[in-house]
Image: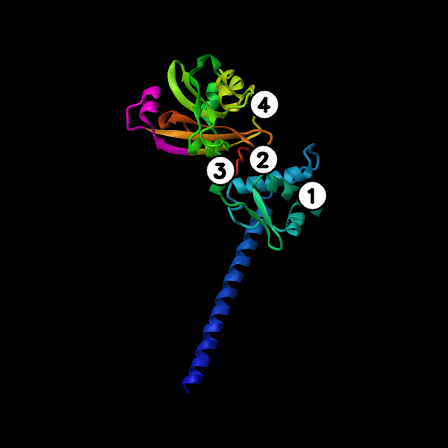
Amino acid sequence: MLHYRSIVKGRIEKAALIGARLFAKISFTLTTIKKYDKMENQTRQIDRDSYEPVYVQLANILSTQIATGELETGERIPSESGLCKLYKVSPMTVRRAINLLVDKGVVVTERGRGTYVKQLNLSSAIFKFADFRQFCDDPSAIEVKILEVSLTPADAIIAEKLALPEGERAIHLRRLLKVNGKPFIYHYEYLVCDVNKPIVEAELEVTSMQGFFEGCGNDLFKRGELNVRAELVSIEEANLLNLDRPAAAINLTHIFYDHCDRPLSWGCFVCPSDRLTFDSFVGMNITGPGIC
């Protein structure tokens, strides 16, 4: 008897689960049908007389629907056949429009599932040094002051960063960048001492803000690795940057490599935290009726 009740209970629970799933599927289908009906009634039609290609018009129509929230983040956009019927265009036109939106980072296509409005992804953010670019536009306000150029034996850290034997000589270069006469950034670096490579000469020729960060005049560097972190300034850094300790700074550590992938330079840009901002943009950058 208990066994029979257990079987009946299991079947009832299974039936209830199937019913709930079916109800959810029907509700989703009805909601989708209503949304598509609304889209059909409010659809901006393709202008056949326009000089703008039809696939671009379609991409702009869809991007506008996304920008206005008609198509929400994570939502599946109408199928290829649905868009063909809705806008009276060919499948090839729909594919070109979708590919354009994918290239713009507006939608994402999943094989066998469809195309969805792309969700916000903070990990894709790329930060720019907006303040640096601003100062590059006004070179008259910039002064690069050389504080020190000397030879120093490589300690364990320098030897590791520059792939040198410990104790071998490296070049120590220290510079202070001023904006309108006020300290803005302190830079120190260690360079490989190689008489066949005019690294120091190229570095000393840098006297502009643009050259300071873009390496103007130095074609010895092939690539670089950068690391950004916040740290408290040392006594020396505080004195050079006119800061009261304790004070925080943004440290941009760099390693530059030559064309044979050998490290040539290791150092750090030290900038007070209140003098540097990081700007970025995530999501869809749709500012007008379309994106194309």
Q: CA distance from mark 4 to mark 1?
A: 46 Å
Give the residue number, with chain letter if any, for mark 1: 93
> What residue span does the magenta drawing correspond to?
229-247
Under tag 1, what secondary structure? helix
Under tag 4, what secondary structure? loop
Query: Residue flagged by tag 1: what amino acid is it?
Result: Thr
Give the residue number, with chain letter if any, for mark 2: 291
Residue pictured at 57% horizontal, 35% vertical: 289
Of discs 3 and 2, which sits in the foreground? 3
Q: Are marks 4 and 3 in contact (CB under 8 Å)?
A: no
Q: In this rendering, is residue 148 above or below 120?
A: above
Q: Position of residue 164 (x, y in %)?
A: 49, 31
Few, some or many C-alpha atoms within 10 Å of disc 4 (few <14, some 14-19, many ≥20)? few
Few, some or many C-alpha atoms within 10 Å of disc 1 (few <14, some 14-19, many ≥20)? many
- Colour theme: rainbow
Q: CA distance from mark 4 to mark 2?
A: 37 Å
Residue pictured at 41% horizontal, 28% vertical: 277
Q: Residue furthest bottom?
A: 1
Residue pictured at 58% horizontal, 21% vertical: 196
Q: CA distance from mark 4 to mark 3?
A: 29 Å
Of discs 4 and 1, which sits in the foreground? 4
Q: Residue furthest top?
A: 140
Q: Are marks 3 and 1 in contact (CB under 8 Å)?
A: no
